[in-house]
Amino acid sequence: MVAQNPVIGQNSVINQEFLRAFHQRNPGITEAVLQRAVDHGITPYRWLADAVPKQGTVLDLACGSAPMRRTVAPGCAYVGVDRSPAELNAAQRSGVSKLIRADAAALPHPDAVFDTVVCSMALMIAQPLDAVLAEIRRVLRPGGLLAATVPAEVATSAHAARLFGLLLGTGSLPRSPNNAALADAGAAFARHRLRLIGDEQRRFSFRVRTGADAQLLLDSLYLQGTGPARMRVLSVAVRTAAVMRPSVPIPIRRLIARAE
Ligand SMILES: C[S@@+](CC[C@H](N)C(=O)[O-])C[C@H]1O[C@@H](n2cnc3c(N)ncnc32)[C@H](O)[C@@H]1O
């Protein structure tokens, strides 16, 4: 029997209402964390952009505050799509102009107009996954590329355990709705004529230097079901742990697929 962690062990699946409210409240928070997560000097955004051709049309699906606009090659014709008005406002404030508010499962674009779809840290939550993958395939030209990052499966327990240390034990975070389907990404993609050609993992590290850093990391987690009183307990715990200046691992998986 797997013990439930009393503080963060909700063992639930993250729902869409929670996600919408979370991104409305915290626009740009994923970027704030991942721009500071490094492995041998590169961020997860740089790693993802390395898989993107230097030219052509690029759709940044679930772009958030649009960190990928600043990471893909300047020669690319970029369009960012997200459903969150707050995230799109953050993207606009940072100078990105080609932005569209839309759902990943119902894109407003014609067929076969993009050379590349990038999707940073969103494929695990965008629902329903089959409709999203069908849309990605529809807007990609044949031979085009899907390049996506998602948290690696091990991220949840390792991330939480390192962040919260012995204070909280080995509880699990709420699961992303598409985790099970993406465990066999090759099969999930193949149903939509997307052939998986790359599936790698890399471990980035976020160095916690201050209590504010620890709070940022805590706030960036989808802690669905954790009420205000628990959040205050967690806040004190992570801020206390920050004096150890821990380096928190953020393992990320990069998936590359070719449109057939
Ligand atoms: C973890 S954030 C990643 C943001 C950005 N790509 C990054 O890496 O910094 C997830 C993003 O997915 C967006 N999102 C989730 N489901 C979506 C959907 N069905 N359609 C469009 N955007 C979606 C959220 O609004 C949020 O901006």
Image: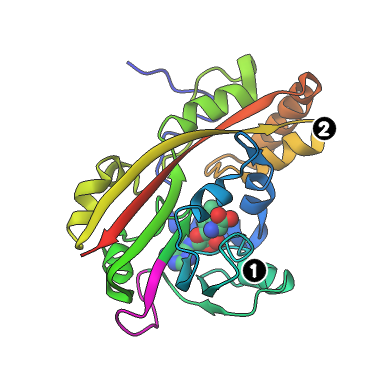
Q: Amino acid at mark 2?
A: Thr
Range shown magenta = 105-116
- Residue 7 visible (yes or no): no
**Image spot of residue 9 (x, y percent):** 48, 29
Q: Which residue is mark 1?
A: 86
In the image: residue 178, left or right of residue 158: left
Considering the whole magenta stretch, tell me its main secondary structure.
loop
**Image spot of residue 29 (x, y percent):** 66, 52
- The quadrant where residue 214 appears: top right
CB under 8 Å between callouts 1 and 2?
no
Q: Which residue is mark 2?
A: 210
How many neighbours does mark 2 have within 10 angstroms: few (below 14), some (14-19), or many (20 or more)?
A: some
Residue 112 counted in the magenta span: yes
- The quadrant where residue 249 appears: top right
Residue drawn at x 53%, y 24% as measured from the top left? 6
Q: Between 23 and 224, which is closer to the camera in this rendering?
A: 23
Above or below: residue 12 compared with residue 102: above
Distance from label 1 to label 2 (Cα)?
27 Å
